[in-house]
Structure formats: structure tokens, C-alpha cells
Amino acid sequence: MKKVMILGSTGSVGTKALDVAEHLGYEITAISANTNIKLLEKQIEKSHPALVACTDDTAARELKFGLNNKTEFFTGASGLQDMIREADFDICINAIVGMAGTVPSIEVIKRGKTLALANKECIVTAGEILFDLAEETGSEIISVDSEHSAIFQCLQDKIPNKPSRIILTASGGPFFGKTAKELENVTAKKALRHPNWSMGAKITIDSATLMNKGLEIMEAVRLFGVPEGKTEVIIHRESIIHSMVEFEDFSILAQLSVPDMKIPIQYALTYPKRYPSSSKKLDLTKIGKLSFFRPDEKTFKSMRLCRDALKEGGTAPTILNAANEVAVEMFLKGKIGFLKIADIVEEALNKTVTLFNPTIEDIIQTDNDIRQKLLI
Ligand code: MG
């Protein structure tokens, strides 16, 4: 029985991670959330974690009041770091949304434990630092992202064969096939209606702009050590093939399943073993056919911006990510139009000087600077 810590336990991946851990009979030793106190309380009651962190100070004050004294409680971003340093766990699922997940990932790696990553932003912004540190401490990093879990599964070959191409699949989101003109006035409500996956708001908007796929290109390059030019994205509307790997002999391996995050979450938790799943079985005859298209990178320019930032290196991915996080929030609040999201990211990349070989402090500083500039 493994001991599991779940960061971001009240989010879309966090709640599914708790279900999977319970299904496997694993022990939940620590959980953290930001503002969703009601759900966090329920989770504490159900899973009895010894340690709990709440990063939002106001929410934390509310929660602390009703807690029993068997639970050790941590408050704020620094409290979360303290909890990670103290917790007893074999594997941590980091399902925190956005850049806020970066420092917690570093703390987990410092402990030398397995890090199951649903937070791609930390790999995008500080990938090199994370992997260097993991090599020092012996920590293993496994992606929970469905595409990267698929690629990881396809690479579990006895003889290490280098992939010649990584093919990331993308559902295309709710606006597949739309022209720029048609996208001018789309609302957040429409953008939040993803055809296949049920996810949190930030990643659903990232899927609609295809920024999510751009971030996933960056994630794949860092995770699997393939050059950027050997990554390709194809639109696959049904979200059944979660990604593919091509080898020198032009054989392509793919991983297929119903679109349910419980499957990659469970694989990360039980790796290298597989156990029965609580998810649904894939019935291909019910699906009938699988379709594939080339992405429209002119209308959806986020992917090109991600490739540019990746080639530039240094703090460029951090600049891109911070600008995107702010722009998505502005769009969700109805302050900017849909197409403006990518414009803001492009402008931030063009106007900000890249710092090369950044330390983690440089990365955090860059992230803060961009947020402040854009929020004025
Ligand atoms: Mg994904």
C-alpha cells in the first residue's frame, strides 16, 4: 500500500486522484487546496489525511475553526512548502493549477520522492532545474497529462529505442474549424464547453486556444528529450488515441482509452504495474471511426508562440506562461475577447528581454514582473 500526497485535491484532477487512490486502497497522508473549503472539509472527513494545507489565508481561517486536532494544519504558500517537507509519502500528485505548482514540485523533488505531475506549467517554466534536481535526489518524475502518459507508456520498451517523432493528439477543443472572424465574439461560457474532456476552467480555455497543446509540446521536449522539430500535433476529434510515438522503422505505437483522467492518474500511481481500473472500457465498435486533421496554426497561433519560446529558451517560456495565465483570467472575467489571449502572449514575448540560464528565483521574479505589468 502506497502513501499518497495530493496537492490541489479539490480541483478536477485532484478529486479524480482521490477516487483512484481510494479505488487502489492507497493511504492518503496529506492534501492541499486553495479556496474550496467545503470540498476540502469533506475530503478530510473521508480520507483522514494527517496533514492538510490551505494556501488561501482567508479560506484557511474559516477551515481551521472546524478542524479536529488530529489533523496538522498548514496555511499559505509557505505553509504548503512546510507540509511537503514534513509529510510522509511515497508519491505526490501535483494537480495545482498554473505557475503556483512550481515551488511545490521542487520541494517534492528535494525529498527524493516520486512526483506524478498534472501541473505542466512547472515543467514549461523550470523544466531543466526540476530534472537536474531530480537526478541529484533520485526523484522520479511521471507525467499525469494524458498525452504524456500515453507517450511514456509507448516508450516502455525493453530495448531503449529512441523515438524519431512524437505525435501529440489534440481534440481541437470547442472551436475546431472556426475562422478568426467567427472567434472574435465568442464568450467564456462557449469556450468552457469542451467536447470530450471535463476539466478545470484554465486548461479548458487553454484547449480552446490550443495553448494547452503548445505547452504540451514544451512538456514533451523536456520530459522525453526529443528535439522540438521532432514533435508534431494532429487534431483527433474523438480523443481516443492519447498520443503516439514513431520509431526509425516508421512503426508507430499509440495508447488508446476512453477520455478519462483516472486512467493516466492510476498509471502514474501504480507504475510500472497495472491494476484493474474503475474507469470505462473502450468499445471501438461503438465509436466506429477515428478522424485526424492538421491544426489551423494561423487562426490558433498559440502553438507557434510556444515553439518560438521553446527555441528561445531561458525565461521565454516563463514569460509566455505568465502572460497566458493572466490573459485567460481576463477572458474568463469578460474583460478581453478570445483572440486577444494569444495577442497578449505574443506581445509579452516580443516586449520582454529574455534572461538566459535563469535560477529558480529569476523564474519566479520574471513570472511576478509579467503579472504586474499586465494587471496594471
Ligand atoms: Mg493533456
Image (cartoon, rainbow, N blue to C red):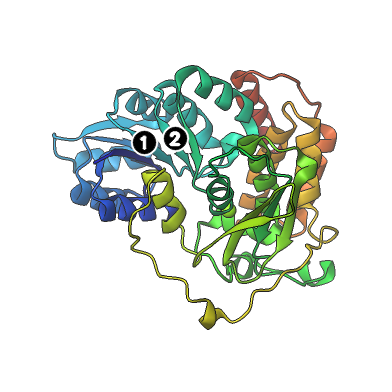
Q: Are marks 1 and 2 in contact (CB under 8 Å)?
A: yes
Q: Judge by depth and name the residue closer to the eye, 356 or 217.
A: 217
* Pointer 1 or 2: first along the chain: 1
Residue that badge 2 annotates = 115
x then y, percent, for residue 259: 51, 65
Q: Residue at x 35, y 60 (%)?
A: 277
Residue that badge 1 annotates = 91
x then y, percent, for residue 53: 33, 35
Tell me if residue 20 can be seen. Answer: yes
Q: Quarter of the image containing the N terminus?
A: top left
Q: Judge by depth and name the residue closer to the eye, 208 or 240.
A: 240
In terms of secondary structure, where does tag 2 sit?
strand
Q: Residue 142's mark?
A: none
Q: Judge by depth and name the residue closer to the eye, 44 or 245.
A: 245
Bin the neighbour count of mark 1 within 10 Å (Cα to Cα): few under 14, some 14-19, many 20 and up. many
Rendered view: 132 above or below 45 = above
x then y, percent, for residue 237: 65, 70
Q: Quadrant of residue 126?
A: top right
Q: Residue at x 54, y 57 (%)?
A: 201
321 with respect to 285 (left or right) = right
